[in-house]
Amino acid sequence: MNRTCEDCKYCVLIDNGYSNYTVEGTDFNCYKELHPDGSFDRWYGKDKRLEYAQQCGGFEAGECIEMDVDRENEADLTAEQRAIWEAYR
């Protein structure tokens, strides 16, 4: 199976828009800032740039952080995800 950036624990996906009911897009971010394209709109998860994980030296398998517009799911983060999210913001 080919790994993608979304399979990395340092992946931070942040929905943007007016509210959770009006999401306009989802920005991909690498907490370690290793992705050569920086932050970008994920485009429904089919963006070829997410395949960078196959050559990324900082890749660590894990559940990526998915943050909604209203930040309602912040309470659902694991302790490890919370530490990454707090340092990222």
Image (cartoon, rainbow, N blue to C red):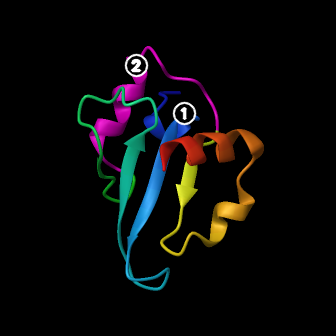
Report which residue position mark 2 lands on. 56
Which image quadrant for residue 36? top left
Tell me the residue at 32%/30% (across/down): 35
Secondary structure under tag 2 reads loop
- Whether residue 9 is visible, yes or no, is yes
Q: Where residue 4 sits in the image (x, y, percent)?
A: 45, 34
- Whether residue 64 is visible, yes or no, is no
Marks 2 and 1 sit apart, C-alpha to C-alpha, by 10 Å
Q: Earlier in the sequence, mark 2 or mark 1?
A: 1
Tell me the residue at 39%/44% (across/down): 29
Q: How many marks?
A: 2
Q: Where residue 52 sits in the image (x, y, percent)?
A: 34, 28
- Vertical position of residue 59 compared to residue 5: above or below: above
Tell me the residue at 59%/35% (across/down): 9
Look at the image and give the residue range highlighted in magenta.
46-62
Secondary structure under tag 1 reads loop
Tell me the residue at 52%/68% (across/down): 68
Report which residue position mark 1 lands on. 8
Q: Where residue 50 sits in the image (x, y, percent)?
A: 36, 38
- Vertical position of residue 79 compared to residue 9: above or below: below
Check disc 2 and give the amino acid type: Cys
Count neighbours of disc 2 (C-alpha within 10 A) and say few if under 14, some if 14 to 19, many if 20 or more: some
Q: In the orientation shown, which residue stands out farthest toward the top?
A: 57
Check disc 1 and give the amino acid type: Cys
- Determine whether label 2 and label 1 are within 8 Å by CB: yes
Which image quadrant for residue 74? bottom right
Left or right, 86 with respect to 43, comes to right
**Residue 57 colored in magenta in the image:** yes
> Foreground residue, 55 or 75?
75
**Residue 18 colored in magenta in the image:** no
> Foreground residue, 23 or 82?
82
Q: In the orientation shown, which residue stands out farthest toward the bottom?
A: 21
